[in-house]
Image (cartoon, helix red, strand yellow):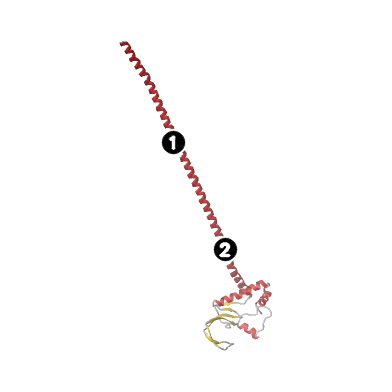
């Protein structure tokens, strides 16, 4: 039986090939990751998966017979449980329905770091957890991308608003400065005009006064001349 056939067999029990494929992938992925991390995966009645360290040693090449040095390495190891052994050996009959792997007698399995019960409920829970764990990174990435887009849009909007505000402020300042200059120019022109008008009025008043004085002085001189002429005539 290969993986595809295993999925088909599980699909008959779960009622869907997609759900069966996801369940098989989730269980295998969970077990592989646990063993790689150094944990021991024990499924009661089925067996134990664990990581074993192999020290450096010498071996022989099967083709040439040459002695070869093998480096230190780590390998996975599976130890079947007592219930699995009994079913394979024939000491126990395989049930026609229901789970084939049942709880093994006490002491038949060495307690490990991680224990996994081979029950349908546990499988469904493991499938849900694996699906949620697989969906979490995608959702997180999507949320992060959405947040980054929103932040970029907000920054762009803020920058545009700041530019508009700066342009408006500059335009307002320029208009105010222009208005102030125009007002100052008008005031200067009005003051200059008022000064010129006052000077002209003052000059006109002075001229009028001089004219009036001249008019008053002229008859007096004429009268004095007449009086002098009369005196001279009488003396003769």
- Quarter of the image where one finds residue 206: top left
x 44%, y 36%: residue: 192
Q: Could you say which is closer to the camera, residue 173 or residue 57?
A: 173
Q: Which residue is mark 1?
A: 192
Circle nearer the N terminus (2, 1): 2
Helix, strand or loop at mark 1: helix
Image disc number at residue 55? none
Q: Could you say which is closer to the camera, residue 80 or residue 200?
A: 200
x 32%, y 13%: residue: 232
Q: Percent x, y for residue 142?
A: 58, 64
**Vertical side of 191 occupied by 64: above or below:** below
Q: Could you say which is closer to the camera, residue 204 or residue 165?
A: 204
Q: Could you say which is closer to the camera, residue 135 or residue 123?
A: 135
Q: Which residue is mark 2?
A: 145
Outermost residue on the front side: it is: 236
Helix, strand or loop at mark 2: helix
In this rendering, would 235 be left or right of 10?
left
Q: Quadrant of the N terminus?
A: bottom right
x 53%, y 55%: residue: 159
Q: Percent x, y for residue 208?
A: 41, 25
Outermost residue on the left side: it is: 235
Q: Local crowd at mark 2 within 10 Å, few (<14), some, or many (≥20)?
A: few
Please give the count of numbered marks on the rendered protein: 2
> Are dots 2 and 1 in contact, CB under 8 Å?
no
Q: Local crowd at mark 1 within 10 Å, few (<14), some, or many (≥20)?
A: few
**Vertical side of 94 occupied by 143: above or below:** above
Q: Percent x, y for residue 217?
A: 36, 21
- Quarter of the image where one finds residue 134: bottom right
Q: Percent x, y for residue 189?
A: 46, 37
């Amino acid at each position: 039986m290969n993986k595809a056939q295993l999925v088909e067999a599980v699909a008959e029990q779960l009622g869907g090939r997609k759900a069966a494929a996801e369940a098989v992938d989730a269980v295998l992925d969970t077990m592989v990751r646990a063993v790689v991390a150094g944990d021991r995966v024990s499924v009661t009645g089925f067996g134990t998966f664990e990581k074993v360290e192999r020290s450096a040693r010498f071996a022989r090449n099967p083709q040439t017979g040459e002695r070869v040095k093998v480096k230190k390495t780590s390998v996975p190891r599976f130890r079947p449980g007592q219930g699995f052994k009994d079913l394979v050996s024939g000491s126990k009959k395989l049930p026609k329905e229901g789970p084939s792997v049942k709880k093994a007698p006490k002491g038949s399995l060495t307690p490990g770091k991680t224990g996994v019960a081979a029950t349908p409920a546990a499988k469904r829970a493991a499938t849900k957890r694996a699906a949620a764990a697989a969906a979490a990174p995608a959702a997180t990435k999507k949320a992060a991308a959405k947040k980054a887009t929103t932040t970029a849009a907000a920054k762009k909007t803020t920058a545009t608003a700041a530019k508009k505000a700066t342009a408006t402020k500059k335009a307002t300042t320029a208009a105010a400065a222009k208005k102030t200059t125009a007002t100052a120019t008008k005031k200067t022109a009005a003051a200059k005009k008022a000064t010129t008008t006052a000077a002209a009025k003052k000059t006109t008043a002075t001229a009028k006064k001089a004219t009036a004085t001249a008019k008053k002085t002229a008859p007096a001189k004429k009268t004095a001349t007449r009086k002098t002429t009369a005196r001279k005539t009488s003396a003769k």
